[in-house]
Image: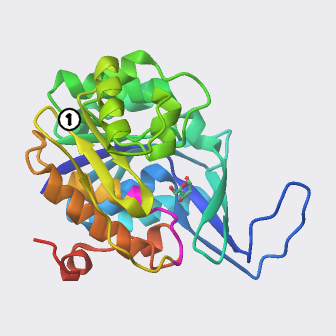
Amino acid sequence: MSKVIVLGSLNVDTILRIKQFPSPGETVQAYEKTSAAGGKGANQAVAAARAGAETNFIGQIGNDGAGKFMLKSLEADNIDGSYVSTSQSVGTGTANIMLNENGQNCILVYGGANQTLTVNDVKKAEPVIKDSDFIVAQFETPQNTAVAAFKIAKSYGVTTVLNPAPAPNEPIDPDLLRLTDLIIPNELESASITGIEITDEGSMITTANKFITMGINNLIITIGDKGAFYSTKKNHDLVPAFKVRAVDTTAAGDTFIGALVSQLKPDFSNIQSAINFAQHASSLTVQHLGAQPSIPHLDDILKTENVK
Ligand code: RIB
């Protein structure tokens, strides 16, 4: 089982259940309001830990009740919070999630303390970065912190994994791409980075080649209920998803990534079976409400069919 460190966000999610998403200018009533621990980074760490990986975390909370709640949530999953710093000036990140009756969501994130994480905070975590098999980062924390973390990781031969989510509205630092061993976008994030729309297997192969020109040799594109396409130096394939009834798709992608790195070998030789495992994990997540409350444990993943 892998040793994983995640650099990323911690958000308290407010989930508002509605019949249909509002149109611009429209007011709709929510019929239920709940709250849960979330944030792409924290979700991915929790998914890795619940799937059995020894997991560490680098992030930032505010000096408030929400921050204490997020730290407790990490610790409940045996994730070491020693490298979660506390901002004295900005509050803990929050996300408002509108969830419709088909289990689809629209998410509005207030970054808060996630956005004030610094390169110095990252450098303090060097002792745990160097002992990890994988480091994982996303775009809910500043890009320069991911660059710093990946530089440290690469200097110790640690495998770097970038989930470019949410799709950034600023250009991605070319250094970050060159420092990335494996990139895991969904089809929209992929298109926003490469300019290539994912329509068929040909466009996936063209996308993989485009990422190679940017310096990234290994790619997994998650394509919702169609499955996941992977491409490495040795191989490429589309691994189909299997159908389940989705109650809430929040954190499905995060679960996929955390579960994947918990199983993946750093030389990617078992990528197909790690993807299969990760798909089983995320298929369980979508059948329950809320981000972290819905992320499955190893036993539950192994109980699902076809996991070897
Ligand atoms: O990927 C799902 C997550 O995105 C939610 O938990 C929310 O906090 C946002 O960061």
Question: Which quadrant does ligand 1 occupy?
Answer: bottom right
Locate residue 299 relative to residue 213 in the image: left or right.
left
- The region drawn magenta spans 247-254
| Residue at disc 1, CB closer than 8 Å to ligand 1 | no
Which is nearer the eye, 230 or 87?
230
Q: Is residue 263 visible?
A: no
Image position, residue 195 (x, y; %): 50, 28
Q: Quadrant of residue 123?
A: top left
Image position, residue 301 (x, y; %): 24, 75
Q: Quadrant of residue 233?
A: top left
In the rendered image, which quarter contains the C terminus? Answer: bottom left
Which amino acid type is shown beneath numbered disc 1? Thr
Which is nearer the eye, 288 or 116?
288
Query: Looking at the image, is 298 positioned above or below residue 53?
Result: below
In the rendered image, which quarter contains the N terminus? Answer: bottom left
Which secondary structure class fits the magenta region best?
Answer: loop
Asked if the magenta segment contains residue 220, the reply would be: no
Tally of numbered discs: 1
- Residue depicted at x 41% and y 30%: 146
Other residues around mark 1 within 10 Å, as few (<14) / some (14–19) / many (≥20): many
Image position, residue 290 (x, y; %): 53, 72
Q: Quadrant of residue 152?
A: top left
Instruction: Give the labeled residue for mark 1.
Output: 159
- Residue depicted at x 54% and y 60%: 68
Asked which colour scheme the image uses, the reply is rainbow
Locate residue 222 relative to residue 126 in the image: left or right.
right
Query: Looking at the image, is 297 positioned above or below residue 200?
Result: below
Image position, residue 261 (x, y; %): 23, 51
Q: Is residue 293 visible?
A: yes
Asked if the magenta segment contains residue 252, the reply would be: yes
What secondary structure is found at the residue carrying circle 1? strand
